[in-house]
Image: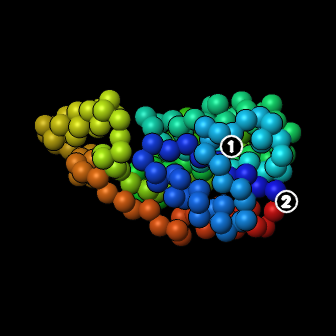
Amino acid sequence: MKILVTYKTKTEFTKWYAEIIAKEVEGELIDFSKVTNEKMSEYDVVVYGGGLHAGRINGFKKAKEMFAKSAAKKMVVFVTGATPNEETETIDEVWKVNLTEEEMESVPHFYMQSGLCYEKMSFPDKTLMKLLANMLSKKENKSNAELGQEQAIKSSYNISDEKYAKPLIEYLLGE
C-alpha cells in the first residue's frame, strides 16, 4: 500500500507530526503546496494534516477537492491544535464544523494536540490572539474554561508528543 503524507502548516507543529507519521508507515512526505491531483493519484492512501485555524482545518477544503479528482482510494485526515486531547467536546465540535455527516463515517480523522507559537504566526493571527487574550483578561466571572483559555493563549507553548500520532499510525499499519 502506497501512502502519501501531506500537510499544511503555519507554525511547524503539523509538519512535525507528518514527519513522524511518514517515517513510521514508510510513506512519502510532501508539503501540500507541492501536491497535485496527479501526484495524489500515485498513492492508495492520502493522509492530510492541517493546523486548526479559526475553527477550520487549514487547507482541508482544497485537499478534499484535489482528493476527489484523484485516483487515490482513501483519505485520512489529522488536525493539530492548541486544545489538549482531553477536551473531547471541543474536538468533537471541530470535526462537526469540518466534516459532513457522511465524511464523519467515511474519512478516518485524528486530532493531535500541539501548541501555540506566536513567533511563527502571521501578524493578523498574532493580533487576533492578543485581542482575545486581552478581552478574556478584562472579563469578570470567568468560567473554568475561560480561565484555562486565558492562561493558554498568553504565550507560546508546545504540548506535542509522538504518542498523539500513534492512533493514526496504528490505523494505517492495520490497513
Measured in 3D between alpha carbons, the distance from the residue under mark 1 to the one under mark 2, in whole angstroms, is 23 Å
The residue labelled by disc 1 is 104
Graded by Cα atoms within 10 Å as few (under 14), some (14 to 19) or many (20 or more), the crowding at tag 1 reads few
Q: For residue 144, say whether it is visible.
A: no
Q: Position of residue 18 (x, y in %)?
A: 59, 56
Q: Position of residue 49 (x, y in %)?
A: 59, 48
Q: Position of residue 111 (x, y in %)?
A: 55, 53
Q: Residue at x 45, y 42 (%)?
A: 10
Task: Give SS at disc 1.
Answer: helix
Number of residue marks: 2
The label shown at residue 1 is 2
User: On the picture, is 23 further left or further right than 135?
Assistant: right
For marks 1 and 2 on the same chain, the one whose residue lies earlier in the sequence: 2
> Which of the colour schemes (rainbow, by chain, secondary structure, one colour) is used?
rainbow
Q: Residue at x 52, y 68 (%)?
A: 162
Q: Nearer the viewer, residue 175 or 8?
A: 8
| Mark 2: amino acid | Met
Position of residue 146 relative to residue 139, above or below, is below
Position of residue 91 relative to residue 134, above or below, is below
| Quadrant (top left/top right/bottom left/bottom right) for the N terminus | bottom right
Q: Residue at x 50, y 44 (%)?
A: 9
Foreground mark, 1 or 2? Answer: 2
Position of residue 55 relative to residue 161, above or below, is above
* Residue at far front of view: 34
Q: Nearer the viewer, residue 41 or 143?
A: 41
User: On the picture, is 103 further left or further right than 89?
Assistant: right
